[in-house]
Amino acid sequence: MKPTRVVVGLSGGVDSAVTAWLLKQQGHEVTGIFMKNWEDDDDSGYCSANVDFVDAAAVADVIGIEIEHVNFAADYRDRVFAEFLREYEAGRTPNPDVLCNAEIKFKAFLDHALRLGAEKIATGHYARVRDRGGAFELLKGLDPLKDQSYFLHRLNQAQLAKTMFPIGELPKTEVRRIAAEIGLPNAKKKDSTGICFIGERPFREFLNRYLSHQPGPIVDERGRTLGQHLGLSFYTLGQRQGLGIGGVKPRGAARGAGDHSPWFVARKDTERNALVVVQGHDHPWLQSGALRFDDTSWVAGQPPADGPLAAKSRYRQADAACLLATLGDGSFDLRFAAPQWAVTPGQSAVLYDGDICLGGGVIASAQ
């Protein structure tokens, strides 16, 4: 591979650090950029941006590259956060990491890097890009436990043509080993598990600052009231924790009838402002044999042909065999060979042909 001018998104984490080091080892001209995407509560105990920048700068120093601090907070608020709030207000559960990748990391960041004279950008995502004679494919990362193609499915041909994912070929254990071997200061830094801008802070407390909320009843499938919810926006389908009804048994239930089975959110009844819960992980109301999705984005620029494929309706899920059917209104139908658990409107349905991520869209409904 000929030496290239590459701008790397350095987050302060180990994945992007090893990404930058690998590119430097391969002879590329590497510069780092730290993206600041959120600044509403810089002074709170949960905002790690300042700590992350210190870590990113320390990594750049060890590797021997320049690093620039760039503020994309205004772009983030307009392009990602506003949509995030709209979806929650509508009773859906959006995936901001998908939107952040499409609108910030591979749009605002890419545009900035190109203005700096970069030929390519690189990030520490576990995914791969394959050039098929000028047509670019997005492939899963080789580490099945870390593959992040689900979050990248809205990338297009122009973005993939300018993108490198150096650690997509490696298992996470190898990334950690390399980081320790070359003495990176963040070699043992814990992986971030928070939503891209919220970080590790309590989610409900965060949403409470931005969303109007109306408490209402928590009811079971027969309509019996079990407790009170804090506002439908604060709950997602399949949720088990934080319902406040752990030991409740519906009045009139038969003795011994699932007394101790956990409760799960199954539906949101927006007309009655009621949160509907069911007992047991395998309850039929938590299973869906089909879904409809829209707001689509296809890696190749056009949708795949109708027929058998595989799909994920949530990130940490095995690929599920399905049949794709195009509907006349710009939306698509997926019918699964086996029922899928807690399919959630607002989340992404992402399609695959083996290791190739084809793209997908936003789940509108399930049945």
Image (cartoon, rainbow, N blue to C red):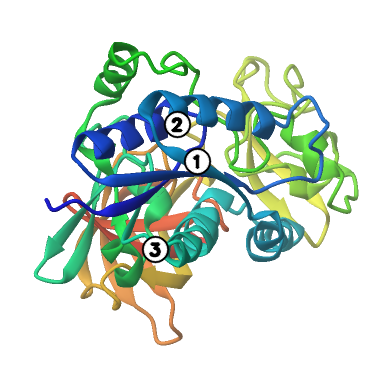
Q: Are marks 1 and 2 in contact (CB under 8 Å)?
A: yes
Compared with residue 334, is residue 14 higher up or lower down, i.e. above or below?
above
Q: Which residue is mark 3?
A: 117
Q: CA distance from mark 1 to mark 2?
A: 6 Å
Q: CA distance from mark 3 to mark 1?
A: 15 Å
- Residue 287: mark in rendering: none
In this rendering, would 340 be left or right of 78? left
Secondary-structure class at tag 3: loop
Compared with residue 22, is residue 74 higher up or lower down, i.e. above or below?
below
Q: Are marks 3 and 2 in contact (CB under 8 Å)?
A: no
Secondary-structure class at tag 1: strand
Q: Are marks 3 and 1 in contact (CB under 8 Å)?
A: no
Indicate the quadrant where residue 132 lies: bottom left
- Residue 67: mark in rendering: 1
Camera-side residue of 199 and 93 = 199
Camera-side residue of 36 and 220 = 36
| Labels 3 and 2: the sequence-earlier one | 2
Residue 358's spot in the image, x, y percent? 27, 62
Residue 346's spot in the image, x, y percent? 57, 58
* Residue that appears at 32% across and 36% down: 19
- Three-letter residue code for mark 2: Ala
Residue 198's spot in the image, x, y percent? 68, 39
- Residue 60: mark in rendering: 2
Q: CA distance from mark 3 to mark 2?
A: 19 Å
Q: Residues within 10 Å of mark 1 (few under 14, many from 20)?
A: many
* Residue that appears at 37% across and 28% down: 63
* Residue that appears at 69% across and 54% down: 73
